[in-house]
Image (cartoon, rainbow, N blue to C red):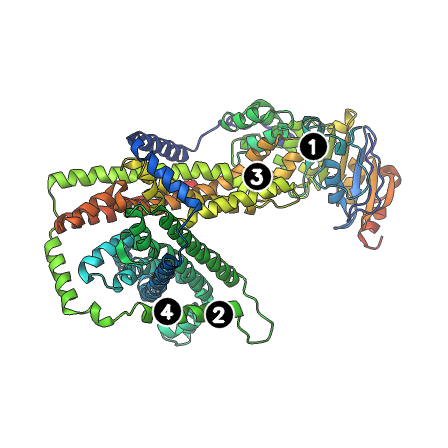
């Protein structure tokens, strides 16, 4: 699996390859380009130059159903979650399956929720099973973040992209959520996660990529790094 | 450590529908079905030829100099009515706001009673359409220009008072309380502590009223008060289609100009341009205010208004005659039966109209919204065309649509419903499109990124967010539509309006009083239902 990037306005000549089974942490100060990099990979941000290969395919060369099939294999926990909010939790989680559902089934599911058992199972993994039929905008910030994680769990993607997926969670839930998101990587997929907390990055990832002002300034196995090495990325004295 | 997380929920969660919303939804569906059933009366095939001739004339409006001159004068009359009517409304509104606002009454028990009483008094003029006021005033004042001014000013004044009062009540009361604590009187404290904060909102609303007044002045013409609407109805009844189209284009232009200018000024009010540290005034706003004041003075001169005719012996005598004749209202069983059936027709018309408009608005709102990011030129063009079509639909007042439809449709629920539906679609389509523009684009983009079908992305990412506001707009427009149904009825489309017109024509004052009371009660009831439904949506 290759991800190669050219030049976007906030990313400057980034060339990065994530291999199968790898768990990669993106580190760097705010504005370094972590979210943009994730956006380029999942297709929400078009690169202005260069090329991207995702799961062995070139998204720019695909159209229609073929592109949708590729995108269904990439799951994202967005930094701002991007939940509609005015829906019940069951629908927000089921939205993870929209990549494989035809439009009619998607519409019918809003009337009669489909695959509720799977949704409840995914929510149980993040400790929210009892909120499955609540309105999403009635949940707290941390609960909403877990809904977004559950969406990725029912999607069962090969590549997981996560942008600060645990920013609003307590330490116990943080460990659990990162473990869940690393699941596909353990089965031959991959995880690419933007993480602010150096300790977390070192504990849950095999490799750390440091970004500064849109450039890759660090790319090393987690085992060879210390928390102090990463602190340097944020401009704090090591 | 994870034991807490994996403990199963005590009770397995069940999907519980929100009963209140379901009840409202089913009630709405039932109302639409009932209205459709009421609309299944006749089509008049004989009128099709006239409609053909009418439609054919659209491309060849009358453009001879003499007629255009007549139209120009008529347009000036309409504008003059609108300006003076709004001026009166703002004046009455300012006075009434003082009486309706919480600030005036305070929080004491007596205050609550006083406020309720004021609101009750204001509800009566508000419940009657401008055109109804026009018809009533004509019988008292004769063909005096005051009829047009008062017919706009009185009902608008009542609405303006309510809105002004609400605006004043919304202003944070800290500064006002501080001034009161420092010994300032109520009026002075309101002038320095409340008014400056509320001024933008008040001015903006006054401006919006002026826009509406232009439309109302056109409509008043249709029932005989002079101006563009009057020219239109003259040409209409003599079947001169090219002239009708000239008048339609002229009044569409006028309404359009009011719409565009009003929105520009209101947008400027929302975000005024100021240079720091300099006491400077916004030129556009200053020009708008001074221009309106000058237009008011000119209108007074142009319409040759004289206060004397308001209080002339003849007018006073007429008021006395009418009031004495109208009291007590008729309680004749036959009349009450026809009032009830006309009220049913009115409700059916309005329900059908809003159903048509809502379905139409939902269909077009996606295209009507300006796309946020990059998009193909075809999509952009479609958006421009749809927005233009909506603009035209709402530029032509509903009664004009109704007059045309009455050629092919027999008087009853259907012509009014279609006419009002078409006009309301113009309004609702724009509002729904703006709701889509304001919705966050993120959720939809996120669904696209995980491979969702565009339709599914819309259903899960946009529809849930805009459903609430669009339904609230639709309910609000329904309340407006019920008022407009009365007006369309006055011109012959059926319902309470038609009944009122026939009772007025025979000078049966007790019956008129009964119909008017029914009208006010119906409007109040509809407002109440709309308010309840909106609350259930929240």
Q: Pointer 2: what residue?
A: B287
Q: Pointer 1: what residue?
A: A75
Q: Give the mark, 2 or 4, whose residue is nearer the N terminus.
A: 2
Residue depicted at 39% across the width and 51% down the height: B62
Q: Please, what secondary structure does the residue beneath circle 1 have?
A: strand
**Image coordinates for residue B96, horizontal then vertical, percent:** 31, 63
How much space separates mark 1 and mark 3, taking CA atoms? 17 Å
Q: Kindly indicate whether the residue at mark 2 contacts the one at mark 3 (C-beta within 8 angstroms).
A: no
Residue B205 vs residue A3, the one in the foreground: B205
Q: Kindly indicate whether the residue at mark 4 contacts the one at mark 2 (C-beta within 8 angstroms).
A: no
Residue A117 vs residue B350, the one in the foreground: B350
Q: Which mark is residue A84?
A: 3
Q: Please, what secondary structure does the residue beneath circle 4 have?
A: helix
Q: Are marks 1 and 2 on the same chain?
A: no
Tell me if B345 is positioned left or right of B479 in this view: left
* Front disc: 3 or 2: 2
* Front disc: 1 or 4: 4
């Amino acid at each position: 699996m290759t991800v190669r990037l050219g030049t976007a306005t906030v990313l400057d000549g980034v060339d990065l390859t994530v291999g199968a089974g790898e768990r990669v942490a993106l580190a760097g100060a705010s504005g370094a380009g972590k979210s943009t990099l994730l956006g380029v990979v999942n297709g929400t941000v078009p690169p202005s130059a260069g090329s991207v290969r995702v799961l062995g395919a070139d998204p720019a060369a695909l159209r229609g159903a073929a592109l949708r099939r590729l995108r269904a294999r990439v799951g994202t926990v967005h930094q701002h979650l991007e939940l509609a909010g005015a829906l019940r939790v069951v629908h927000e989680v089921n939205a993870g399956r929209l990549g494989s559902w035809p439009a009619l089934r998607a519409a019918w599911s809003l009337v009669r929720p489909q695959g509720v058992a799977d949704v409840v199972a995914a929510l149980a993994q993040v400790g929210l099973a009892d909120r499955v039929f609540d309105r999403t905008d009635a949940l707290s910030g941390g609960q909403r973040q877990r809904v977004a994680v559950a969406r990725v769990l029912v999607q069962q993607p090969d590549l997981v992209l996560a942008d600060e997926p645990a920013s609003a969670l307590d330490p116990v839930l943080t460990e659990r959520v990162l473990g869940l998101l690393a699941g596909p990587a353990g089965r031959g997929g991959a995880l690419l996660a933007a993480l602010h907390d150096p300790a977390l990055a070192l504990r849950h990832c095999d490799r750390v990529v440091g970004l500064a002002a849109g450039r890759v300034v660090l790319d090393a196995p987690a085992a060879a790094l210390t928390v102090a090495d990463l602190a340097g990325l944020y401009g704090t004295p090591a | 450590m994870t034991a807490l997380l994996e403990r199963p929920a005590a009770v397995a969660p069940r999907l519980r529908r929100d009963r209140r919303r379901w009840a409202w939804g089913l009630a709405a569906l039932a109302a639409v079905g009932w209205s459709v059933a009421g609309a299944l009366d006749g089509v008049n095939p004989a009128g099709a030829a006239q409609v053909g001739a009418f439609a054919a004339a659209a491309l060849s409006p009358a453009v001879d100099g003499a007629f255009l001159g007549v139209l120009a004068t008529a347009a000036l009359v309409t504008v003059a009515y609108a300006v003076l009517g709004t001026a009166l409304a703002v004046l009455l509104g300012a006075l009434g706001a003082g009486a309706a606002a919480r600030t005036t009454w305070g929080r004491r028990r007596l205050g609550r009673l006083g406020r309720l009483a004021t609101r009750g008094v204001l509800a009566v003029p508000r419940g009657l359409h401008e055109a109804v006021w026009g018809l009533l005033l004509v019988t008292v004042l004769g063909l005096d220009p005051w009829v047009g001014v008062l017919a706009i000013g009185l009902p608008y004044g009542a609405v303006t008072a309510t809105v002004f009062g609400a605006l004043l009540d919304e202003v944070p009361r800290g500064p006002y309380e501080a001034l009161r604590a420092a010994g300032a009187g109520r009026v002075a404290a309101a002038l320095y502590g409340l008014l400056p904060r509320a001024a933008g909102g008040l001015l903006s609303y006054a401006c919006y009223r002026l826009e509406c007044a232009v439309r109302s002045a056109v409509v008043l013409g249709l029932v005989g008060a002079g101006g563009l609407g009057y020219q239109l109805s003259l040409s209409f009844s003599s079947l001169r289609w090219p002239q009708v189209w000239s008048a339609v284009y002229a009044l569409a232009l006028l309404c359009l100009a009011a719409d565009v200018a009003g929105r520009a000024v209101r947008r400027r009010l929302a975000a005024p341009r100021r240079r720091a540290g300099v006491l400077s005034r916004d030129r556009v706003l200053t020009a708008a205010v001074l221009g309106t004041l000058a237009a008011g003075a000119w209108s007074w001169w142009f319409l040759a208004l004289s206060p004397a005719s308001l209080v002339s012996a003849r007018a006073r005598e007429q008021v006395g005659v009418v009031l004495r004749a109208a009291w007590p209202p008729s309680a004749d069983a036959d009349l009450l039966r026809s009032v009830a059936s006309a009220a049913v027709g009115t409700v059916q018309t309005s329900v059908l109209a809003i159903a048509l408009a809502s379905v139409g608005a939902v269909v077009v709102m996606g295209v009507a919204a300006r796309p946020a990011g990059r998009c193909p030129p075809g999509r952009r063009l479609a958006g421009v065309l749809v927005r233009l079509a909506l603009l035209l639909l709402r530029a032509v007042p509903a009664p004009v649509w109704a007059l045309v439809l009455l050629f092919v449709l027999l008087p009853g629920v259907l012509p009014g419903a279609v006419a009002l539906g078409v006009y309301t679609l113009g309004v609702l389509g724009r509002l729904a499109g703006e709701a889509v523009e304001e919705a966050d684009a993120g959720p939809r983009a996120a669904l696209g990124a995980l491979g969702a079908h565009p339709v599914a992305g819309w259903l899960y990412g946009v529809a849930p967010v805009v459903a609430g506001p669009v339904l609230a707009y639709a309910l609000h427009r329904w309340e407006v539509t019920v008022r407009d149904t009365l007006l369309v009825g006055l011109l012959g489309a059926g319902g309470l309006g038609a009944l009122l017109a026939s009772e007025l024509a025979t000078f049966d004052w007790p019956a008129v009083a009964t119909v008017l009371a029914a009208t006010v009660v119906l409007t109040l009831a509809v407002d109440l239902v709309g308010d309840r439904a909106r609350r259930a949506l929240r």
